[in-house]
Image: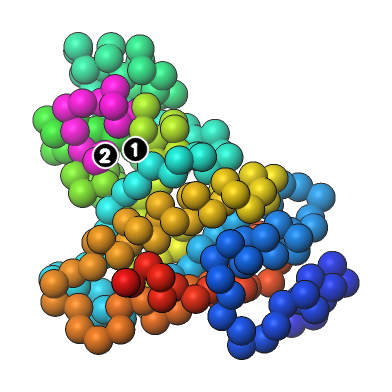
């Protein structure tokens, strides 16, 4: 794969094979994020668990102290008083059957996160085949199936992100934008890593964090030394 000149210049700043201290790595990410747009900074954490086993799942949600730098559009399945509460809390879309029809009939996905009250899950279940593969299905562990819709919306808008293992036992998560600078990115990174370590399943054996790489959207990956988080 041929890389552009900017990428090649950025890659020269990084020592191959070196494990960087988190703050140093995040400083480098800011220096290597040279695209014309404000690049997203993503963390990729490979864990020493087997996601095929239910007792080794790692999943949860955490509010990043400095947000993600992205405006999140929240869709809420709720009715009556809870629907009014969701609208007052700043939900972008609120409804019941009308939203199901729009998603299934128009293949509409103009939202980033779905929240539902527990009594709506029978209805939302009909969307499992379309929301599931996109990682949009509401889940109690992520705090997106709840009666407290106002808190759920406030947390999401403030920068709450969900982390979960993919099929290769890697967690991929955004921790902000290049424009945040090293300090804010470090605070977000520490919060995310702390949550992942806390979520370690009792059934996990051996080395928990196998590797951790951070990169901006168009920049090269930088390997991070995560020893201090496992202390």
Tell whether 101 sits left or right of 31.
left
Q: Classify the position of the C terminus by image quarter.
A: bottom left
Please report contact status of discs 1 and 2: CB closer than 8 Å, yes or no: yes
Residue under label 2: 144
* Residues drawn in magenta: 143-153
Q: What colour-coding does the image apply?
A: rainbow
Tell whether 119 sits left or right of 23.
left
- Which residue: 30% across, 78% down? 208
Looking at marks 1 and 2 on the same chain, the residue that comes earlier in the sequence is marked by 1
- Which residue: 45% across, 40% down? 65
Q: Secondary structure at mark 2?
A: loop
Residue under label 1: 114
Answer above or below: position of 212 versus 37.
below
Residue 194 included in the magenta stretch of the image: no
Front in this rendered view, residue 171 or 121: 171
Residue 146 included in the magenta stretch of the image: yes
Q: Classify the position of the N terminus by image quarter.
A: bottom right
Between tags 1 and 2, which lies in front?
2
Q: Position of residue 220 (x, y in %)?
A: 68, 72
How far separated are the C-alphas under marks 1 and 2?
7 Å
Q: Position of residue 57 (x, y in %)?
A: 22, 67
Q: Position of residue 95 (x, y in %)?
A: 30, 22
Tell whether 37 sits left or right of 149.
right
Q: Secondary structure at mark 1?
A: strand
Answer above or below: position of 88 versus 18.
above
Front in this rendered view, residue 164 or 47: 47
């Amino acid at each position: 794969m041929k890389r552009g000149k900017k990428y090649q210049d950025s890659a020269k700043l990084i020592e191959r094979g070196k494990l960087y201290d988190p703050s140093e790595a995040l400083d480098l990410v800011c220096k290597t994020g040279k695209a014309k747009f404000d690049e997203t900074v993503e963390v990729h954490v490979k864990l020493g668990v087997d996601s095929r086993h239910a007792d080794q799942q790692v999943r949860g949600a955490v509010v990043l102290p400095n947000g993600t730098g992205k405006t999140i559009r929240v869709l809420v399945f709720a009715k009556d008083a809870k629907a009014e509460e969701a609208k007052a809390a700043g939900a972008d879309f609120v409804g019941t059957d009308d939203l199901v029809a729009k998603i299934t009939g128009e293949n509409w996905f103009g939202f980033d996160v779905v929240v539902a009250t527990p009594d709506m899950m029978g209805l939302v279940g009909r969307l499992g085949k379309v929301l599931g593969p996109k990682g949009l299905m509401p889940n109690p562990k992520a705090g997106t199936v709840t009666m407290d819709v106002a808190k759920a919306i406030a947390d999401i808008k403030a920068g709450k992100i969900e982390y979960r293992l993919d099929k290769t036992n890697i967690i991929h998560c955004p921790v902000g934008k290049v424009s945040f600078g090293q300090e804010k990115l470090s605070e977000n990174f520490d919060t995310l890593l702390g949550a992942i370590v806390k979520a370690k399943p009792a059934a996990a054996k051996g080395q928990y964090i196998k590797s951790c790489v951070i990169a901006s959207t168009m920049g090269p990956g930088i390997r991070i030394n995560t020893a201090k988080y496992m202390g």
